């Protein structure tokens, strides 16, 4: 699962990953967040945090990554 973290500068996309990350997480959370940030900024930064219970990516998410 991917969650967008709050309280970061507008040009930073901060993500927290827990459990299994799926293709749906990429398509429904990560990609829209990146596209929206790129509308406002020429360059963006990505902070990708994996938690202790992060178990990995499903095959669809690996393909997207």
Image (spheres, grey):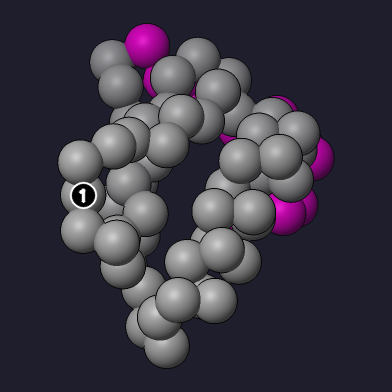
Point 32% across, 46% down: residue: 14
Could you tell me residue 28's position as x and y percent?
71, 40
**Residue 39, placed above or below residue 62:** below
Could you tell me residue 3's position as x and y percent?
46, 29
Point 56% across, 63% down: residue: 36
The residue to which callout 1 is attached is: 8
Is residue 24 shown left or right of residue 37? right
Is residue 41 shown left or right of residue 47? right
Could you tell me residue 49's position as x and y percent?
30, 37
Is 14 or 21 nearer to us in this picture?
Answer: 14
Verify whether residue 13 appears in magenta: no
Is residue 1 shown left or right of residue 53? right
Secondary structure, mark 1, is loop
Is residue 65 shown left or right of residue 52? right
Q: Which residues are magenta?
A: 53-65
On the question of residue 61 being in view, the answer is: no
Quarter of the view holding residue 58: top right
Is 21 or 2 nearer to us in this picture?
Answer: 2
**Residue 63, placed above or below residue 58:** below
On the question of residue 64 being in view, the answer is: yes
Verify whether residue 64 appears in magenta: yes
Quarter of the view holding residue 65: bottom right
Point 54% across, 76% down: residue: 39
Quadrant in which the N terminus is drawn: top right
- How many labels sit on residues? 1
User: Neighbour class for label 1 at 10 Å: few (<14), some, many (≥20)?
Assistant: few
């Amino acid at each position: 699962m991917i969650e967008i973290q709050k309280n970061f500068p507008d040009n930073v996309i901060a993500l927290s990953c827990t459990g299994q990350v799926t293709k749906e997480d990429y398509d429904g959370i990560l990609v829209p967040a990146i596209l929206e940030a790129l509308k406002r900024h020429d360059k963006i930064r990505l902070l990708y945090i994996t938690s202790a219970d992060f178990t990995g990516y499903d095959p669809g998410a690996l393909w997207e990554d």
